[in-house]
Amino acid sequence: MALALNDLVDGGRIALGGLKDFAQGIGEPSLRLGVTGLSRSGKTVFITALVHALLKQARMPVFEAHAQGRITRAYLEPQPDDDLPRFPYEANLAALTAQDRAWPEGTRRISQLRLTLEYEPRGFFARNFGRGRLHIDIIDYPGEWLLDLPLMKLSYQEWSAMMVEASRKIPRNKIAREWHHVLNAQKWDGPSSEEDAEKAAVVFTAYLAKCREDEIALSSLPPGRFLMPGDLQGSPLLTFAPLDLPSDATITSGSLASLMERRYNSYVAHVVKPFYFGHFARLDRQIVLVDVLSALNAGPSAIQDLQTALTDVLASFRLGTNTYASTLFGRRIDKVLFAATKADLIHHQSHDRLEAILNELLAKAATRAEFQGAAISSVALASIRATREATVKQRSEELACIAGLPEIGQSIDGQTFDGETEAAIFPGDLPESPQSAIDGSMEGQLRFVKFRPPELTGDTFAHVRLDRALEFLLGDRFP
């Protein structure tokens, strides 16, 4: 009964958000585009590059309405949601184009930006009755927050069991030792203690952070706010951790487990649900940026964990075809694009192979999403291309390399770069068979360094398949 009541209340919250968006959009068509991805996947650069390309009329032949010259004007407007911070487009662009150019800081909280496109309609109805204007409300949020959504259906005991069990498997077990030491010392049925809760939260957060490091590159690491706390830093809402509870444990009032359970439930109620109902359940389209290359290089555990995370991500979306009723009472996401980022770190000969690997990772989850009526696609993407391609002769062999300015301090084969000297690097080739990459055979075979942003020549940045991404996400909205 309680569960049914909660479902009814949650449905009402979705409907209220839908009615709000419908009222705001009367006479002014708008599309809410969610942009997410796990840390360091390139969300901030993607949004900055997307907006800059449209404002500056960059060359994008696959984005049909743009290539045909039907988009006549693009400009930024005040965002519709006053309770959201504005995405810092201008500051990000300044970082990318300054004399000591650098990549902008990554996403650490939710933000919004409204980009308006004016266009020449094609159809008779659109020409005579439409206004030829589309508002695109870009919602940027950390992917770590997205991975929290399954917690809405997990009890504290279920979540604890899941996290503890995962931490005892390779490769997590090696980096969970300090947390396990604290975990084993704590008595879940002993008296509640703020000091014990704080200590457990600190070592558990440190364990999650180690799981995210490049050498391990794991993806499924909820609660997301532990790694991306935003304005919750130091809050009691983040002062809890899993406990090693017996399967038949009964949590009694006043116990340490009772304190942890209360904090967990508060986190779900005051952090996860407001994000879901206030923002996430109101999206029309979604792009998920994925750092597939780092997972391939880290080995089979990272790949399997990434596949689990992608499945959880798709399961969290409100997918389906939108109707008049869904527009009124809660939108559904009808298109989801998964983008394998950093495609400029490999030669173009491997771009299609990178897409195939991502498709293989998504295969099972995508079938479920398409059954619900949503369109799913993938692309190998570099929002801003930091490299160019080059051929290097090594003895009698010609290697397909990439060239650019490695960031200062980056090193490969014993050479450390100064941030000013260009280098040509052979990154390795992706296999023709996606399954042979997913089985872990690529571990340690890819050679990457971080490159500085390219110098802006002319008005626009070079990119890899940004126009394909825009055509899928926006192309049908220019009748």
Image (cartoon, rainbow, N blue to C red):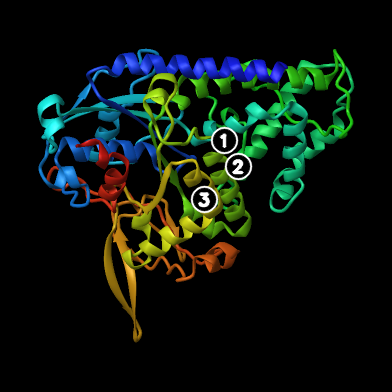
Number of marks present in the image shown: 3
Sort mark 3 into few (<14), some (14-19) or many (20+) by Cα contacts within 10 Å. few
Q: Is residue 68 or residue 84 the one in the foreground?
A: 68
- The picture places residue 215, in percent across and down from the top left corner, at 58, 53
Q: Residue at the location (29% across, 36% down)? A: 48
| SS at badge 1 | loop
Locate the C terminus by quadrant.
top left
Residue 346, horizontal then vertical, whole percent: 37, 62
The reply, left or right, for residue 92 in relation to residue 217 is left
Q: Are marks 1 and 2 in contact (CB under 8 Å)?
A: yes
Which residue bears the numbered disc 1? 147
| Secondary structure found at label 2 | loop
Instruction: Count neighbours of disc 2 (C-alpha within 10 A) and say few if under 14, some if 14 to 19, many if 20 or more.
Output: many
Mark 2 — residue?
220
Q: Nearer the viewer, mark 1 or mark 3?
A: 3
Looking at marks 1 and 3 on the same chain, the residue that comes earlier in the sequence is marked by 1
Residue 297 screen position, x and y as percent: 53, 59
